[in-house]
Image (cartoon, rainbow, N blue to C red):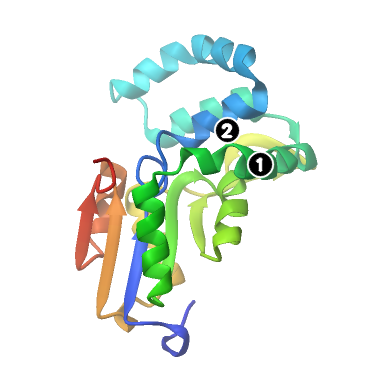
Amino acid sequence: MFTQDNMKETLVLFDFDGTLARGDSMLAFARFYCGNARFLLGLFYLLPMLLAYKAGWIPNWRAKEYFLTYFFGNEPLPRFQQGCERFAKEKLPGMLRPKGLGCLKKHLASGSPAVVVSSSAEDWLSPWCRQQHIPLIGSRLETRDGQITGKLDGPNCYGDEKARRIRELFNLDDFSEIIAYGDSKGDFAMFGLATRHYYKPFRK
């Protein structure tokens, strides 16, 4: 838990997929890691599940686990981590929205603590966040016997879970202002913590 001694008066919360970055980093990482052919074949195989998710018949976390299990289940952890590092270095920078990155850097330059809060896995976002010297709150992937299982380790960092994880990391009473940036209904609970929020702010 961060304490008042190392806090500034403004906390800034950034969603990642669709907000700081164009598109979905989970899809982009799967394509980067598996290659185009296996990725497209996987989407075809998972199409019934994806349609069921779009129709609201299965929850976000369940769809995510189907996807993760298909593409990454039983992957050796060292190889997976190497892929995450390569993705963060080679692919992810090109996904960033210039206005979003500029806004993030402006807040950091002002001394305001900023944090990325994403439903995507911490594994492929954390190398970039470390480079920016900002904390990351994201979904966590289960590992067993040195392999990725394809399951989530704990709740999906989406909706109410985003708000819970933010409260877990920060004492919100230490801030006179909380600014949140997001682009989907998965960010609405995070918006509920904010004194100011911006929906799809960097798309123009």
Q: Which mark is residue 84?
A: 1
Tell me which residue sits at (25%, 75%) in the image: 177
Tell me which residue sits at (65%, 20%) in the image: 35
Query: Quadrant location of residue 91?
Result: top right
Residue position marked by numbered label 2 in the rendering: 29
| Image coords of residue 176 (percent x, y) | 25, 80
Query: Quadrant location of residue 115?
Result: bottom left
**Residue 159 visible in the picture:** yes
Report helix, strand or loop for mark 2: helix
Q: Quadrant of the C terminus?
A: top left
**Residue 153 visible in the picture:** no
Q: Is residue 34 above or below residue 59?
A: above
Q: Nearer the viewer, residue 10 or 174?
A: 10
| Image coords of residue 130 (percent x, y) | 60, 60
Query: Neighbour class for label 2 at 10 Å: few (<14), some, many (≥20)?
Result: many
Query: Quadrant location of residue 174?
Result: bottom left
| Amino acid type for the residue under numbered disc 2 | Phe
Tell me which residue sits at (42%, 47%) in the image: 16
Report helix, strand or loop for mark 1: helix
The reply to whether dot 2 and dot 1 touch (C-beta < 8 Å) is: yes
Q: Is residue 200 above or below residue 174?
A: above
Q: Is residue 128 left or right of residue 113?
A: right
Mark 2 → mark 1, Cα distance in angstroms: 8 Å
| Amino acid type for the residue under numbered disc 1 | Cys
Q: Earlier in the sequence, mark 2 or mark 1?
A: 2
